[in-house]
Amino acid sequence: MPLISTKEMFKKAYGKYAIGAFNVNNMEILQGVIEAAKEEKAPLILQISKGARNYAKLVYLMKLVEAAMQDAPDIPICVHLDHGDSFELCKEVIDAGFTSVMIDGSHLPFEENIAITKKVVDYAHPRGVVVEGELGKLKGIEEHVVSEEAVYTDPDEAVEFVERTGVDSLAIAIGTSHGAYKFKGEPRLDFERLEQIAKKLPGFPLVLHGASSVLTDLVEKANKYGAKLGGAKGVPEEMIRKATMMGICKVNIDTDLRLAMTATLREQFALHPEEFDPRKYLGPARDAIKEVVKHKLRNVLGCSGKAEEILASIKI
Ligand code: G3H
Ligand code: 13P
Ligand code: ZN
């Protein structure tokens, strides 16, 4: 089936389950994610960042996505630009066939964020492409913009932002951050704020970035074989589940895939130092990604088995 936007996915998911948005940078990552979705019969968002595009070239990534669609004809798949930082980049990927883009103006003043987001919406919507905006700042690095302090999303501003831009979904800041070091002390998310935002924007799809759980067994395995990931901490899975019930429809996961791949590669190199056929270590790394994604789809996002109801709601 052709690529789809997130419209029907979010309509079905709202308040019940979430769609996993997994970052894709190469064939092994994509195959791990796709195999997991096939086995779980789950809908998917494949997201490609500017960094992924620079690393692998857009044309290669689009051909891989095309192959994934053929390999998984019964899985509804959306291809999404993660953290688009300019109108030109959003336009380029829309013209290349993406069905969803994020324009991340979260580091800009409110009015400038509205202006650039609206410009992308005005280009995307007539072409059947949906747009994710972001309001509030996550702590850490977002596409090379470093934010020392988080600025949580203001619920009233969120309403104004959505009304004035026409965005289809909104990424909010409630305490998550990108990468493997999300909390110094106890993990804490501002669920009251999420509740207020969802109340003021009833039924409107909200997005959680920085939603990796930094799974302990992966960190321990990586460290056992030489990594230095002391103090790594992610968002507890029960918090993701709770957020999903409260209006978060899209959950962004990249770090957990990186950890699965890195831990497995380190283990393979340590256990089989005589091996030099890349397939012998990339294969297990791909399997590790598949297992992590299966776990997320089934036990965290609750979207296993939901491919069919989404397909049924789409008239192609
Ligand atoms: O939000 C960041 C994602 O993990 C993508 O990371 O920009 O290094 O590809 P990247
Ligand atoms: P993690 O670093 O928690 O995986 O978040 C990824 C993300 O938000 C991509 O946009
Ligand atoms: Zn992000």
Image (tube, rainbow, N blue to C red):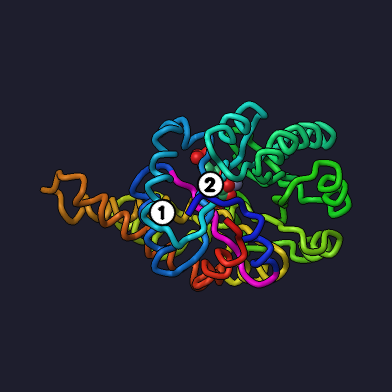
Visible residue check, residue 210? yes
Secondary structure at numbered mark 1: helix
Question: Measured from the top left, where is residue 53 in percent x and y?
Answer: 47, 33
Visible residue check, residue 233? no
Q: What residue appears at the point 67 percent right and 40 percent down from the top-left corner?
A: 148
Q: What residue appears at the point 19 percent right and 51 percent down from the top-left corner?
A: 280
Gap between marks 1 and 2 measured at Cα: 23 Å
**Residue assigned mark 1:** 259
Which of 73 and 206 lies nearest the eye of the viewer?
73
Which of 49 and 168 lies nearest the eye of the viewer?
168
- Apparent side of residue 192 relative to residue 4 in the rendered image (left or right): right
**Residue assigned mark 2:** 79
Asked if residue 206 lies in the magenta stretch, the reply is no
Asked if 216 appears above or below 226 in the picture, the reply is: below
Which of 211 and 41 lies nearest the eye of the viewer?
41
Question: Measured from the top left, where is residue 184 in percent x and y?
Answer: 60, 56
Which kind of residue does numbered mark 1 sit on? Leu
Q: Quadrant of the C terminus?
A: bottom right
Secondary structure at numbered mark 2: strand
Which kind of residue does numbered mark 2 sit on? Val
